[in-house]
Image (cartoon, rainbow, N blue to C red):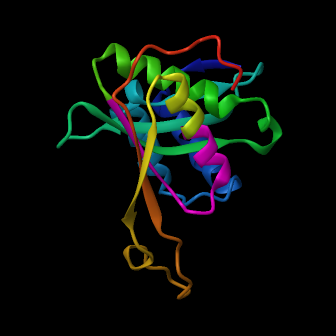
Amino acid sequence: MRLSHPSPEDGPHMWRLAGATGMDVNSPYAYTLWCRDFATTSVVARDADGRVAAYVTGYVRPDSPDTYFLWQVAVDSAYRGQRLARRMLDFIGDAIAEQGLQYLEATVTPDNAASRALFASFARDRGTEAVWSPLFAEEHFPTDDGELHEPEDLVRIGPFGPRNVDSED
């Protein structure tokens, strides 16, 4: 896998991947615009054929310029179990640390054990901890079918220390 920042041409592929992985999907326009305006704070993983196999999107919070907010992580089912999400998170973590950012935030549903373990591992290897707190309740996410969306808890990781590159996680 080759990791790099996305370009607008990657937007449609990221949109399709979000849908295929069952994530909350934004419009194709949003993904394409994201690849233009937030390319330096996002990453795509390309397989040997150059196809987008995974991505991370995020941005620096305007009201907290020392904080990166991770918006989405998606990994094609064919590439799961290869630590690709962690490799992309490390890529982003290194990039934002070089920019002087001190914190990474993300939201995760309470039952998403894989994402919670990913962020805990990332925090440990950065010499800090993952602090969890409620952020958004079900009523923040209306749906057309009346089904409730799960709440989203905030994880805040930092301040960053040097990365432990010898970790086995």
Q: Is residue 110 above or below residue 157?
A: below
Residue at the extreme bottom: 146
**Picture coordinates of residue 54, whole percent (x, y):** 65, 35
Q: Which residue is at 60% across, 19% downward?
A: 3
Q: In which quarter of the image is residue 128?
A: top left
Q: Which residue is at 64% across, 34% downward?
A: 85
**Picture coordinates of residue 53, whole percent (x, y):** 70, 34
Q: Which residue is at 47% across, 38% downward?
A: 57
Count of numbered badges drawn on the protein: 0
**Picture coordinates of residue 107, whole percent (x, y):** 45, 53
Quarter the N terminus occupies = top right
Q: Camera-side residue: 123 or 98?
A: 123
Relative side of 157 to 67, left or right: right
Looking at the image, can residue 89 be seen?
A: yes
Q: Which residue is at 57% across, 42% downward?
A: 73
Q: Camera-side residue: 45 or 32?
A: 45
Quarter the C terminus occupies = top right
Relative side of 160 to 91, left or right: left
**Picture coordinates of residue 94, whole percent (x, y):** 45, 17
Queried whether the magenta region covers residue 8, the answer comes back as no
Relative side of 164 to 32, left or right: right
Queried whether the magenta region covers residue 108, the answer comes back as yes
Q: What stretch is highlighted in magenta?
A: 103-119
Residue at the extreme left: 63
Q: Quadrant of residue 162?
A: top left
Looking at the image, can residue 5 be seen?
A: no
